[in-house]
Image (spheres, rainbow, N blue to C red):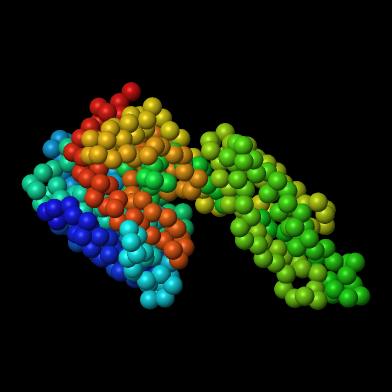
Amino acid sequence: MQTLTTEALLEAVRQWVLIESPTQDVAAVNRMADHAEALLVAAGARIERTPGAMGYADILIGRIAGETEGPGILLLGHMDTVHPVGTLAGDLPWRIKGDRAYGPGIYDMKGGNSIAMSALQHLAATGRRPRMPVSVMFIPDEEVGSPSSRSRIEDEARRHAIVLVAEPSGDGGRLTVGRHGIARYYLKTTGKPAHAGAYHAKGRSAIREMAHQILTVEAMTDYDRTITLNVGTMSGGTHENMVPIHAEACVYVLVPTREAEAEVREKLLALTARDPDVKLDVTLGLFRPPYVKTAAIQKLYDHAAGLARELGFDVAGERIAGGGSDGNFTGALGVPTLDGLGVIGDGPHTHYEHLLISCLVPRTQLYVRLFETLTPALVEA
Ligand SMILES: [Zn+2]
């Protein structure tokens, strides 16, 4: 890619979108990895591809030399989407309508992956190099919490000076300087079964107990402190004429700080059953720690916003995002992390997911300038 034109950048995005890659479909995500690998090779990268583990696809890393040596930039992107194979031929076909381009995963986050790669290919094609070395890391399982890649992401982050994340930007292009911590808790109640007719009084309903617990848990939500507890799934019972013996629910928790996380964790793990004859178990599942803005992250943001102004556009401010990303892991380790460097658009995880075509050229140029100007000194205390 010699020139950064809208047509060329949009075609590059289309190539990503046409390969559907739901997290659970290992072969599909590996086809996406094959494509990403070819792009990395074209950008002059040395490839390290690690076979998938835990039922997920491969982890792909491409290392690109910089003008200087030493710890460089880690660029994070995920290759997986939440859309099953067939979405492209069904509910969400590739299509252009005005300034919008639609497709599965186009906003979260194939558009961001694509423009970051186009920027690196542009540097290579014009005989230039990033100032610092760049490691591009493509993850196969972010949409389910990165279970197979978390430790690898953390290892890589510790070896780099700066982390950039190509996740979608916020309203109007805002960059992400922090993210809430996210935890999943599993609630399980075990009651006593009985026939729902003559023996109803002998039973102890696991569902009734769970209903009480759900109200208790949801009441812990505190919008003023941006603490949210959402019971997102629940199930229970085996037959309508039985007092249910089992019920299960999953609570999705968002917290702004480590302190708030500890406070909520303590409350949830201390929950007890109202009915002494029903057993309640609470377990913590996948957890992304909060990523909180630091002075170094402020400097990164200010630098990026300044570059955008030189290029003639405004990044529209900074935001603390409610949703999680792999930036949570690197930010929580204290590695300066700037997220939300992907495309502008809307509708992640929906059938109206789209990006704004007009953002492609400026946002790719921003990547080019970031790669050309970022230095370790910028984020030093
Ligand atoms: Zn994402």
Nearest to the observer: residue 253 or residue 358: 358
Is 378 on the left-hand or right-hand side of 146? left
Nearest to the observer: residue 173 or residue 229: 173
Q: Residue furthest front?
A: 98
Which residue is located at x 22 percent, y 56 percent? 6
Q: Residue furthest top?
A: 381
Residue 161 is situated, as x and y percent measured from the top left of the image, at 29, 35
Is 1 on the left-hand or right-hand side of 321? left
Where, by quadrant of the figure, is residue 80 drawn?
A: bottom left
Is 71 on the left-hand or right-hand side of 284? left
Residue 309 is situated, as x and y percent measured from the top left of the image, at 27, 35
Residue 53 is situated, as x and y percent measured from the top left of the image, at 38, 61
Q: In the image, is residue 128 above or below residue 193? A: above
Residue 165 is situated, as x and y percent measured from the top left of the image, at 34, 46
Is 31 on the left-hand or right-hand side of 174? left
Which residue is located at x 35 percent, y 57 percent? 355
Which residue is located at x 77 percent, y 68 percent? 244
Considering the image in quadrants, where does the C terminus appear?
A: top left
Considering the image in quadrants, where does the N terminus appear?
A: bottom left
Where, by quadrant of the figure, is residue 277 drawn?
A: bottom right
